[in-house]
Image (cartoon, rainbow, N blue to C red):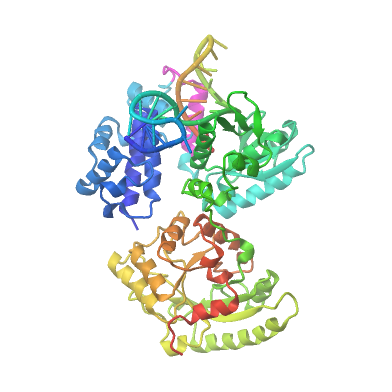
DNA sequence: GCCGTTTTCGGCCCGACTGTTTTCAGTCG
């Protein structure tokens, strides 16, 4: 799992923090931050690159390339070691406390010798911060509050939880008199896999009524900050929500600004500066005259900068600006492109709803095809048998006859599949002759996650080489916030998928989103095809598709990359794979 | 420390809110 890139990125992120804390050049700190991001997201493994290759990574120049080489050779970077020697690791940890940044952390360390969250808590209780310049009673309170947040969950939440809150707030605020426009922005609009806080943007002449309604919502636990243009609250579940109110004629610039990402915004503002313009949330202005040029729509803002409108899911400074300037933005997959779901369960195994209900719900969603893929016998707790599976197939064929003929839309074809269990050797539940009876096979790893890297890699490659396995389900098996992904040689796995015609799943469940956006970008370079599936265990889960599609967009996928956007005939050819029959 | 249609030096995004410092620094996004 851990590419050298991730280690180097973490090291440079730490170095950037240490530079800030020690009062070093802020621009230098920012360069290291940017380099850390570029390296972490770079497609090639840095351990395979020489100094020249390293310098092709954006934001990596001579000095940083040398540090990468030093790290790869010796496992350490002397410049980082020097700063580490000056500042205990606990001081950097202090900056993780909300409202406490590098300046205050350094003051606490230098004046009071505080180098851990525990020591800071004690010092506040002993009133030792009182004499420190810049630290008053309110600051003490804010820090204690921040520590409490840090120590409770305080972390990022899954996308579906954030989406529920955001859609609720937008609905409430949209009803307020004077609210001209209202939507969610930020990382949620970019459909990141986890969300730190929810950003809501509204356009109105007068912000008063919106701010009042917002702070009086029933699930508001505390008002963190309140002003005329910005108010922040925290919900009873601990999620922070920011509301910004802008004048209606600033809507486009504001939406662009509050959607981010920060890195994308820095790039767009730089583009503006180079054209003698200034971009802020209030509009795009001529620097000399101060006159507003555009800001009513996002399209206007991007167009004036020489860019096409860039879909929010691409706004991460991962090459979208360059692609936009060259007119080479991808034609991203949309949820409406999806023709069917290829990984779903019923109550025959661990699903909650019976076959008939799942199929009816799928038809309601307008799918052209739909695969039932219950678990196979080797996941012992599911008590699957050959007989039960064959009986289900018979029922699926009956329903297929029914739904295939139905007049509404063009009918829906049902596929009978299975989710096989990839055992520690890469084998699966059934021999070829039984597998041949399925319309498609998903195969996934459900246990033995901690095998040696070589064994894990062999396991996946062997699964790909099975002529009956069409899709690798939730490939890294991660559970966001709970279980890391497996440590296989993903280059080898992705290459095997491409070579054998095995698709990789983008599992849409919010706690998986597996593959992740970065893995998708990586796999696509190998020429892999993908399947965006819900892995639904209930009717409600079918709606998770939007998150899988969002993740695919973040991985720059087009319709053609995703097999379940294809017409059924093309899909069937793909599913035949290397089978001889 | 990186970068370049203002290219080898001199810039490097911009604004809101908070608390304490009576005019601004720190933090955040």
In the picture provided, is A104 more to the left or to the right than A280? Answer: left
Q: Residue furthest right?
A: A177
Picture quadrant where residue A391 is located: bottom right
Magenta-tinted stretch: A130-149
Whether residue A449 appears in magenta in the rendering, the answer is: no
Residue A268 visible (yes or no): yes
Residue A543 visible (yes or no): no
Q: Is residue A524 above or below residue A156?
A: below
Determine the main secondary structure of the stretch shown in magenta.
helix
Picture quadrant where residue A455 is located: bottom left
Residue at the image position 50 percent from the left and 37 percent from the top: A266
The N terminus of chain A sits in image quarter: bottom left
Q: Is residue A551 above or below residue A290?
A: below
| Count of numbered marks | 0
In the picture provided, is A239 more to the left or to the right than A474? Answer: right
Residue A388 lies, in percent from the top left, at: 54, 86
Residue A463 lies, in percent from the top left, at: 38, 76
Residue B11 lies, in percent from the top left, at: 44, 26
Q: Residue furthest left?
A: A74
Residue at the image position 73 percent from the left and 81 percent from the top: A406
In the picture provided, is A60 more to the left or to the right than A216? Answer: left
Residue A305 lies, in percent from the top left, at: 57, 39
Picture quadrant where residue A357 is located: bottom right
Residue at the image position 75 percent from the left and 32 percent from the top: A205
Residues A278 and A73: in front is A278
């Amino acid at each position: 799992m851990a590419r050298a890139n991730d280690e180097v990125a973490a090291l440079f992120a730490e170095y950037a923090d240490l530079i800030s804390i020690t009062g070093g050049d802020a621009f230098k700190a920012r360069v290291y931050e940017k380099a850390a991001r570029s390296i972490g997201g770079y497609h090639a493994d840095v351990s395979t690159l020489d100094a020249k290759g390293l310098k092709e990574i954006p934001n990596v120049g001579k000095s940083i390339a040398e540090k990468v080489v030093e790290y790869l050779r010796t496992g350490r970077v002397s410049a980082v070691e020097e700063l580490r020697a000056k500042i205990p690791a606990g001081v950097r940890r202090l900056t993780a406390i909300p409202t406490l940044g590098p300046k205050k952390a350094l003051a606490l360390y230098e004046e009071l010798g505080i180098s851990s969250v525990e020591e800071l808590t004690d010092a506040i209780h002993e009133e030792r911060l009182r004499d420190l310049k810049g630290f008053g009673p309110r600051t003490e309170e804010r820090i204690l509050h921040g520590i409490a947040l840090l120590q409770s969950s305080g972390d990022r939440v899954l996308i579906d939880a954030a989406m529920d809150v955001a859609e609720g707030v937008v609905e409430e605020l949209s009803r307020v008199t004077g609210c001209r426009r209202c939507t969610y922005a930020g990382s949620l609009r970019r459909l990141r896999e986890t969300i730190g806080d929810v950003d809501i943007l509204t356009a109105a002449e007068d912000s008063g009524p919106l701010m009042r309604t917002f702070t009086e919502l029933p699930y508001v636990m505390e008002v963190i900050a309140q002003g005329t243009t910005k108010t922040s609250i925290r919900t009873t579940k601990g999620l922070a929500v920011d509301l910004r109110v802008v004048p209606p004629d600033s809507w486009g610039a504001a939406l662009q600004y509050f959607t981010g990402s920060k890195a994308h915004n820095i790039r767009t503002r730089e583009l503006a500066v180079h054209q003698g313009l200034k971009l802020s949330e209030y509009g795009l202005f001529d620097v000399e005259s101060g006159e507003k040029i555009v800001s009513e729509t996002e399209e206007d803002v991007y167009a004036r900068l020489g860019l096409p409108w860039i879909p929010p899911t691409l706004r991460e400074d991962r090459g979208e600006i360059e692609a936009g300037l060259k007119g080479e933005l991808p034609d991203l997959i949309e949820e409406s492109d999806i023709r069917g779901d290829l990984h779903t369960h019923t109550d025959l195994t661990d699903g909650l709803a019976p076959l008939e209900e799942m199929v009816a719900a799928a038809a309601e969603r307008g799918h052209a095809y739909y695969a039932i893929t219950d678990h196979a016998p080797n996941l012992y707790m599911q008590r699957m048998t050959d007989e039960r599976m064959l009986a289900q197939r018979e029922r699926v064929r009956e329903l297929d006859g029914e739904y295939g003929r139905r007049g509404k839309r063009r009918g829906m074809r049902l596929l009978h599949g299975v989710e096989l269990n990839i055992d520690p050797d890469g084998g699966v539940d059934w021999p070829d002759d039984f597998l041949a009876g399925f319309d498609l096979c998903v195969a996934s790893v459900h246990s033995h996650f901690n095998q040696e890297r070589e064994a894990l890699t062999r396991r996946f490659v062997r699964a790909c080489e099975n002529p009956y396995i069409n899709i690798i389900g939730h490939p890294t098996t991660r559970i966001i916030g709970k279980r890391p992904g497996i440590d296989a040689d993903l280059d080898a796995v992705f290459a095997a998928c491409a070579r054998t015609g095995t698709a990789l799943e983008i599992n849409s469940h919010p706690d998986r989103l597996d593959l992740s956006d970065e893995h998708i970008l990586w796999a696509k370079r190998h020429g892999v095809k993908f399947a965006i599936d819900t892995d639904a265990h209930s009717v409600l889960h079918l709606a998770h598709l939007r998150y899988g599609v969002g993740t695919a967009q973040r991985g720059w996928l087009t319709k053609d990359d995703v097999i379940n956007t294809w017409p059924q005939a093309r899909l069937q050819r793909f599913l035949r794979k290397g089978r001889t029959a």
